[in-house]
Image (cartoon, grey):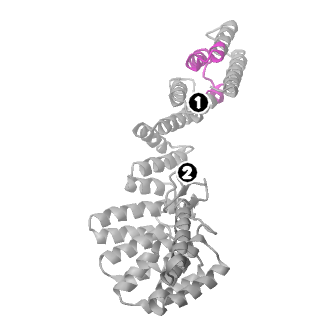
Amino acid sequence: MPEFLYFLLALLLMLAWVAGRANGLRQPRKESTGELAKHYFQGINFLLNEQPDQSIDTFIRSVDVTPHTLETHLALGNLMRQRGEVDRAIRVHQNLLSRSSLNQQQLNQAHLELGRDFLKAGLLDRAERLFLDLVEDTSGNFREESLRHLVQIYRDEQEWRKAIRAAGMMQKTLFGRANNNMDIEQAHFCCELAKLSMGKGDLLDARGHLKAALKFNKNSARANILWGDLEMSALNFQAALKHYRMVPQQQADCLPEILERVRQCHDNLNDQDGLFKQLKVWLKEYPGTSVLQSLVDVIRKKNGENEAALFLGESLTINPSIKGLNTLLDIQISNSQGTVRDNLSLLQNVLEELASRQPNYRCQQCGFKGARLHWLCPQCQRWETVKPIRGLEGE
């Protein structure tokens, strides 16, 4: 372990020893001060010889668990957990639970920390049992924190109904906005249930889950995207468009996700004029490379490549982007021959290679980068923090 960790552990042992001595002045002791000092220096020796397990055993054996030393025990266990030494943290916190000198509040604190140890270790079933016990605690001091951990466990286990129920217990009403912002998470849990129902072909059940998602979070773009997909699968293209058109009003960053879906709906409805008008409105209200490319594709089919190139060139002078330039090169290549065509193709290949190496999305919370949208960031485990990258290399 690094030197600073040795120092911290030694300091904790010293503080515990001092607290133990101070407590010993007020009540009878099982061990003498000299014996405590002996164990203390044994613990320091184990640390210096890189034997942290023996050091922790010495600490547990020599320092009584009292209201005066409880925080030292908890701090040591939490330090071990944060450093990834989960087995050692578990030993410290299990030692606390075995002591009869603690009151119920203090035992619950140790209970919570042990549950966090199990959660860190991936022992979800053990962690769940501990947190469920704390939810029943009548004092309620650890109830909300335990419920939050239960939501995390059920999310990781994809127990979506249990996750919704645990999140709902953190607020007074089943529906409505919560002060702890659990409405966003609950909406996503409903969306996960809707996906399962859609996979089974149960569209009625899926609609029910999507309605619930929008009750939890009226700005759930994911719910309307899934609802649009549901209507598309049922060949209800007008109904699908109704839901897709809600998406940019809810979360403008999700607009690139629906552009191909919207095009397919208009193609099936044989309504290219409607698609053209819709894309023009979106480009004005939510300017971005993806919308621009979609609109240019429509112009190429509708009015020819010259007009598409002219429109694209004017747009790129205002908002330049690599993807937009690549589209412009594609138009120019189709109108070129010989050496000019070959040179433009070479330039396009270079730009395509450059673009393929760039991520399309970035988490605004932790900086995670990826090629596709993740509703739940794989790195920081937060919902709806992954957004499209904007600027020259993105939108």
Q: Of the residues shown, which amino acid type is indicated by label 2?
A: Cys
**Magenta stretch contains residue 68:** yes
Q: Residues within 10 Å of mark 1 (few under 14, many from 20)?
A: many
Q: Amino acid at mark 1?
A: Met
Checking the image for residue 80, the label placed there is: 1
Percent of width and height locating residue 83: 59, 33
Residue 7 visible? The answer is: yes
The quadrant holding residue 64 is: top right
Q: Residues within 10 Å of mark 2 (few under 14, many from 20)?
A: few
Where residue 340 sits in the image (x, y, percent)?
A: 55, 78
Horizontally, residue 1 falls left or right of residue 208, namely right
Identify residue for label 2.
380
- Tell me the quadrant of the picture where the C terminus can be found: bottom right
> Against 23, is 294 above or below?
below
- Tell me which segment is drawn in magenta: 45-73
- Residue at figure coordinates x 38%, y 82% from the top left: 265
